[in-house]
Each structure stands twice: as structure tokens, then as C-alpha cells.
Image (tube, helix red, strand yellow):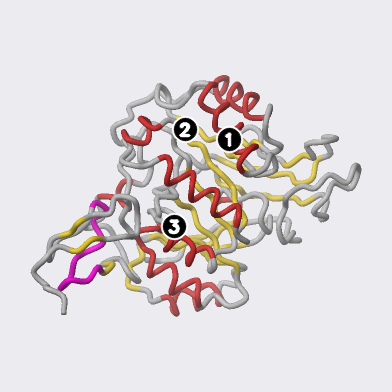
């Protein structure tokens, strides 16, 4: 029998928090309740948004399809530039609604969504909520935006339920991750495991002035991706806007372009705010055209909002030269509109 007065270890993420009875781990949502770890954000929703898969920063999985994006609260990192701090760390008093996994799935069906994605806050700390929702998704696909801070055993189970994943790699330096309350090696292991699974993988590198904006760092990351994964894995480079403890200014478009050119030495598909179209890396033929506008509102403000996706060629390989484009489950939709459900 468990001694309900003693501490219990949470084995979900590399922090391995030893949590006293009645207290919470570093994420603020996983609690030692009578000797067992439980998630206090299960079925608690702070954001529910119908939008394009491209707005989840996933370009090569069912392009043009529609997803119901779900946000809860809590995070197991402490980024000083967090774009969604309210949902990640300061959720007391914000509007939220109790929606069971079954209710979320029904919302997606009624709204005629093609998939369900967890985003906004860190899905890892909503592990049971995500797993329960994805398990009932049926024919809809499932997707995640995550920081990759998860241990191998729960990751293995999660990957079996997840069709597509975008992992933020916030720095390619050990001390950079330490500053953010994360662990670079864990994130790298998550990325490799995802690539080796059946889950579609894309990577995002959010650029913060003075923190990770040097060409040597993006070069090291890109070489690692090409060697350990494949040159065909898409890399998204985005500018982080001033937020929280980051007063700015944001990096210039010239710096972003220099980083893109460095990454392109090793990778086939490198996207930025000004380079959002998909071209064949071999012959340059345009495959998909995307148009976006700057995103306003509360969620993921460093990401653009895609209001048009034009799929010019529907084949997973280039029609001109036959080069494989690493586009999974090609979709046949050409326009996207966004609307928010009431929380």
C-alpha cells in the first residue's frame, strides 16, 4: 500500500519532479494526490480554434486540411520570451471550459474538421488528455506542437496515437536549454524517436535576438538534422516578437535570411515568414503556394496565419524531375479560413 503522506516521482518528463503529497511539479499541473500523480488540466480547455494545418506550422502533412486546435494550460519549460505565457504559466482567472475528449471529438466532427491538434500550451503536460482525445479520433488525423520534453516510455505510447508532430528546438546549445529550464539531449532524443516512428515530423527553430541568432548554431542544428534524420525534414525558422522578459527588438529580416541560407546548405525545405512556398529542392518547381498575414490575438503570435494554400501539384514527388518531396498523405484542398469557437 502506498503511503499517501510521502512524496511521489513524476516520470513524464526529464525534470522527474519529486512531488510532496498535495503539491505540484514544475509544470504546475501535475499533482501528487494521495500518492498518485494526476493531471489537473484534464479536459480543461483555454483555446479551441478551427484553422489550417499550416497554422500549426506543419507544411508537409495533408497540406490544406483543417484541424481543430485545442489548448489547455501548463508547461514544463520557462522560456523568457514565451508567446503564450498566460496559458503556460499564469492561467488563474483566464476563461476556460470543461470539455471531455468525447466533446472535443464531436466539435471536430460537427465543424467538419480533418484532424485534431493540441497546441497553445505544452501538450506533454496534458498527456492523459491528449492520449484520451487522440484514442477516440477515429478517421481524423492527430497532430501536436510540442517542446519535446518527454521521457522515452510515455513518448513511445504517444507516438502510436499521433500522426504528425512539430517539435520546437529552442536552442542547439546545452546552456541555452538550461536557461529555458529544458534539456537539449531529451529534445534531440524525442526528435530522433519521432523520425524513426510512423509519425510525420517537422522542426521549428524560434529565433530570439542575442540568444540563438548566430549562423553557427543554425548550422550545427541543420547538419545534425541532415545526419541523424534526413535533409528532407522541414525546418521552420520564425522570428520571436518581444514578450514577457524579452524586450526586443526582434531579429531583422536580414538575419533570418542569413540563417535560412545557412540551413539550406544542408536541408531541402527551410521555411521563414518570407519563404513559405514549397519548391522542389532539385529543380525549383513550385509545388505549393502559401499566403499568410501577421497573426493577431492571444495565441502563438510569432507564427503567421495562413489564409490561402494553393496546391499546384498534387503528387508526393516533383512532376518535373521526380524528386521525393516528403509530403505525407497529400491533401486536395486549396483554401483555408479560420474561426474561433466560444470557450
Residue 226 in picture, x, y percent from top left? 65, 37
Name the quadrant of the N terminus.
bottom left
Q: Which residue is mark 2?
A: 172
Magenta residues, start to end: 26-37
* Observer-nearest of 151 and 243: 151
Residue 171 in picture, x, y percent from top left? 44, 33
The answer for how far apart the CA atoms under marks 1 and 2 are is 10 Å
Query: The residue tagged with tag 1: helix, strand or loop?
Result: helix
* Observer-nearest of 223 and 140: 223
What residue do we see at 32% from left, 73% from top?
98
**36 drawn magenta:** yes
* Observer-nearest of 335 and 59: 59
Residue 2 in picture, x, y percent from top left? 16, 75
Name the quadrant of the C terminus.
bottom left
Q: Which residue is mark 3?
A: 152
Q: Nearer the viewer, mark 1 or mark 2?
A: 1
* Observer-nearest of 24 and 337: 24
Q: Quadrant of residue 265?
A: top right
Name of the residue lying farthest toward the front = 1
Query: The residue tagged with tag 3: helix, strand or loop?
Result: helix
Q: Nearer the viewer, mark 2 or mark 3?
A: 3
Q: Which residue is mark 1?
A: 224
What residue do we see at 8% from left, 69% from top?
5
**175 drawn magenta:** no
Amino acid at each position: 500500500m502506498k503511503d499517501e503522506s510521502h512524496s511521489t516521482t513524476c516520470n513524464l518528463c526529464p525534470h522527474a519532479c519529486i512531488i510532496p503529497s498535495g503539491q505540484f511539479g514544475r509544470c504546475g499541473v501535475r499533482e501528487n494526490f494521495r500518492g498518485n500523480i494526476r493531471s489537473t488540466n484534464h479536459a480543461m480547455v483555454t483555446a479551441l480554434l478551427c484553422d489550417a494545418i499550416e497554422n500549426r506550422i506543419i507544411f508537409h502533412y495533408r497540406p490544406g486540411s483543417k484541424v481543430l486546435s485545442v489548448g489547455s494550460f501548463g508547461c514544463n519549460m520557462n522560456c523568457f520570451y514565451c508567446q503564450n505565457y498566460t496559458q503556460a504559466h499564469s492561467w488563474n482567472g483566464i476563461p476556460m471550459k470543461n470539455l471531455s475528449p468525447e466533446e472535443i471529438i464531436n466539435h471536430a466532427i460537427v465543424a467538419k474538421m480533418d484532424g485534431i491538434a493540441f497546441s497553445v500550451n505544452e501538450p506533454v503536460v496534458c498527456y492523459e488528455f491528449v492520449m484520451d482525445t487522440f484514442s477516440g479520433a477515429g478517421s481524423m488525423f492527430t497532430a501536436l506542437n510540442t517542446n519535446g520534453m518527454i521521457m522515452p516510455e510515455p513518448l513511445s505510447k504517444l507516438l502510436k496515437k499521433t500522426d504528425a508532430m512539430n517539435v520546437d528546438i529552442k536552442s542547439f546549445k546545452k546552456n541555452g536549454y538550461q536557461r529555458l529550464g529544458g534539456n537539449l539531449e531529451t529534445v534531440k532524443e524525442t526528435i530522433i524517436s519521432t523520425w524513426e516512428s510512423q509519425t510525420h515530423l517537422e522542426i521549428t527553430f524560434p529565433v530570439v535576438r542575442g540568444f540563438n541568432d548566430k549562423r553557427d548554431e543554425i548550422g550545427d542544428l541543420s547538419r545534425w538534422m541532415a545526419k541523424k534524420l534526413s535533409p528532407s525534414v522541414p525546418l521552420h525558422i520564425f522570428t520571436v516578437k518581444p514578450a514577457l522578459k524579452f524586450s526586443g527588438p526582434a531579429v531583422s529580416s536580414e538575419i533570418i535570411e542569413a540563417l535560412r541560407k545557412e540551413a539550406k546548405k544542408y536541408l531541402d525545405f527551410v521555411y521563414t515568414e518570407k519563404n513559405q512556398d514549397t519548391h522542389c529542392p532539385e529543380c525549383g518547381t513550385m509545388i505549393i503556394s502559401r499566403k499568410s498575414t501577421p497573426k493577431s490575438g492571444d495565441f502563438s503570435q510569432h507564427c503567421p496565419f495562413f489564409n490561402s494554400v494553393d496546391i499546384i501539384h498534387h503528387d508526393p514527388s516533383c512532376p518535373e524531375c521526380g524528386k521525393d518531396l516528403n509530403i505525407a498523405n497529400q491533401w486536395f484542398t486549396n483554401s483555408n479560413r479560420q474561426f474561433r469557437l466560444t470557450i
